[in-house]
Image (cartoon, rainbow, N blue to C red):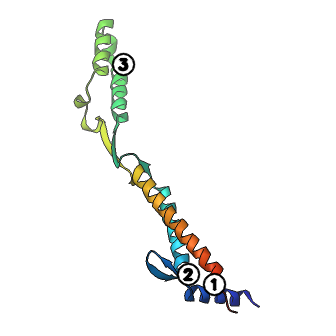
Amino acid sequence: MRLVELQAAVNVANAVHTLEYKGARRPLWWAICRLKELKSESSLIESMATHPRRERVTECSSKWENYQMLADNSLRSSSVYYEMDSRQKSHALADIRNMQPEDAPERFRPTSITHICEIPLREREKLLSDLRKDYKELNGLLEFENHQSFVTL
C-alpha cells in the first residue's frame, strides 16, 4: 500500500470522527488545526516584548552631555580661555558644568522617550496560561478520540 492512500484514509477518518469540545461537536481535523493555532499563538505571545507596565518613560540625555562636552572643548580651545586667569577659567568651566538643559539650544536638550510594551507581563502570563490549558485539554481529547477511531483502508 502506498503512503498517499494511508494519508487519505487518515484524513477521511479525521473528517468523519468528531469530539466534544466546549459544548460543541467538532471534527478531529478541526482539533488538529486548532492545536496548531494554539501553539502558534503561544509562540507569538512568548516572543512579544514585555514589561511590568504598558508604558514607561526614559530620558535620553546623551545629546545634553555632548553639548556640555562641546561647550567645554570650545571654551578650552578658544583664545579667550588662554587670556583668563585661573579663577576666571574655573568659573567659566563651572558655568558650563552647572548649565541647565533649558539654557541649551533645543536640539541638545534632553528628551523623554515613551516606551510602549506590546503586552504587560501579567497579561502575557495569563494569556500563556490560558493557551497552555486549552492546548492540554484539547490534546487530551484528541488523543483519546484517536485511540477510539479506526482508519478504513
Q: Which percent across, then down, holds residue 62?
A: 37, 34
Judge the density around disc 3: few (<14), some (14-19), many (≥20) Cα neighbours within 10 Å: some
Q: Badges 3 and 1: C-beta atoms under 8 Å apart?
A: no
First of labels 2, 1 by sequence position: 2
The residue closer to the viewer here, 16 or 2, is 16
Please tell me whether residue 137 is drawn above or below residue 85 in the rendered image. below
Q: Could you tell which of marks 3 and 1 lies nearer the N-terminus?
A: 3
- Does the CB distance between marks 2 and 1 fall below 8 Å? yes
Q: Residue at x 75, y 89 (%)?
A: 2
> Which structural element holds mark 1?
loop
Residue 120 in sight = no
Q: Residue at x 77, y 91 (%)?
A: 1
Q: Nearer the viewer, mark 2 or mark 1?
A: 1
Q: Can you say which quadrant of the picture contains the C terminus? A: bottom right
- For badge 3, the amino acid type reads Arg
Secondary-structure class at tag 2: helix
Query: Which quadrant of the figure has residue 7?
Result: bottom right
Residue type (three-letter) at the residue carrying disc 1: Ser
Residue 143 location (% of width, % of height) = 61, 74
Q: Is residue 80 above or below residue 38?
A: above
Residue under label 3, please give it. Answer: 76
Please report whichever mark, 3 or 2, sits nearer to the chain's N-terminal start: 2
Name the amino acid type tagged 2: Leu
Residue nearest the observer in this picture, 51 or 77: 51
**Residue 29 visible, this orientation:** yes
Q: List the residue tagged with mark 2.
A: 28
Q: Nearer the viewer, mark 3 or mark 2?
A: 2
Give the CA distance from mark 3 to mark 1.
87 Å
State the image coordinates of residue 25 (x, y, percent, origin top left): 47, 82
Numbered circle sitting on residue 149: 1
